[in-house]
Image (cartoon, helix red, strand yellow):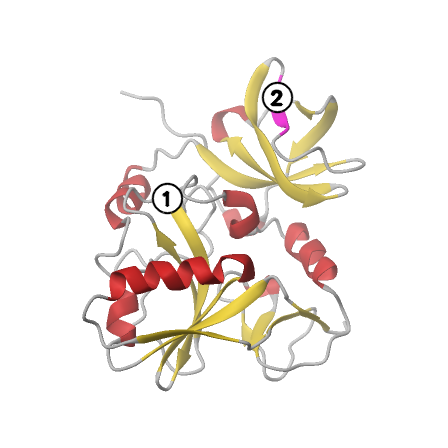
Amino acid sequence: MTARIAPLPDRAVVAVTGPDARTFLHGLLSQDALSLEPGQVRFGALLSPPGRLLFDLFLWGDADGVRLDVAAARRDALIARLTMHRLRAQVAITSEDTPVWAAWGAPVAGFTPDPRLAALGGRRLGEASANATIDDWTDHRLALGVPDPDADCGIDRTYPIEANFDLLNGIDFSKGCFIGQETTSRMKRRGTLKTRMLPLAFDGPLPPPGTEVLTGDLRAGEVLTGRDGKAIGLMRLDRIAGPLTADGRPLQVERPEWMGDALAPPPPPP
């Protein structure tokens, strides 16, 4: 299969450099920054103190610190948030014009495997040659049922486990403290999650984002973002087994292998 290579203009780069860069980020983010090797990439998040998602990001190891691959529209907000936490840490936080790329379909030299899921392909910071578009990348991502946290989660509204960060290597549960860690760890430990972002399949155009998904007369979730025939929905795990409709049309929850047994409904309360 021929590799597809697409620029991701909706992503941008923030460089965090200086002698305290890794320690500084390690105490803030859901992912381990201390052991990040140069050239290595990890997926993580910056959460609010109550444990809801503020920023999804990729951490790229660099010789003098870490570069963060974040949503372009929220880069300045991330810089402001990190600057607020800097205090006396010896770090510099700056924006870069480095482009972000995705490749899939076959290995491409110079691309690092996407840390979320091998089938997603690879990512690259820097220059590359395109033979695909961001729309092609979106189709590929949706075919695998992987959410786009920036588009699907909103700001300070969604818990990272609801957005499958626990299944997509976005949380290091052994690293110790980070902002929002207590809530995140408790949700994982108790296994009582009621809703998750799941791939939806249907015929025809995308229902308007926010459209209710119903099972009979009961609310089963809502449509988030997607394209014709495919979408991501935030769904109640105890209401996905029966016939589902949205905007008066039938749809189905798909069950990708990478989700394992995560679609099991929460146990009843004792």
Pointer 1 residue:
52
**Residue 100 falls within the magenta-colored stretch:** no
Identity of the residue drawn at 64% across and 35% down: 209
- The residue lying furthest to the top in this view is 217
What's the distance in space between the residues labelled 2 and 1, CA to CA? 26 Å
Residues 201 and 92: in front is 92
Q: Which quadrant of the figure has residue 107?
A: bottom right
Sequence-wise first label, 2 or 1: 1
User: Residue 109's quadrant in the figure?
Assistant: bottom right
Q: Residue at x 27, y 20 (%)?
A: 270
Residue closest to the eye, 35 or 100? 100
Where is residue 234? Give x, y as percent: 53, 35
Task: Residue at 26%, 69% (x, y): give it.
Answer: 24
SS of the residue under disc 2: strand
Residue neighbourhood size for the residue with mark 2, other residues' Cα within 10 Å, grouped as few (<14), some (14–19), many (≥20): many
| Residue 199 place in picture, x, y as percent | 61, 42
- Determine the main secondary structure of the stretch shown in magenta: strand
Does the segment drawn in magenta span residue 212? yes
Q: Is residue 211 above or below residue 98?
A: above
Q: Which mark is residue 214?
A: 2
Q: Which residues are magenta?
A: 211-215
Amino acid bearing label 1: Arg
Q: Nearer the viewer, residue 42 or 73?
A: 73
* Front: mark 2 or 1: 1
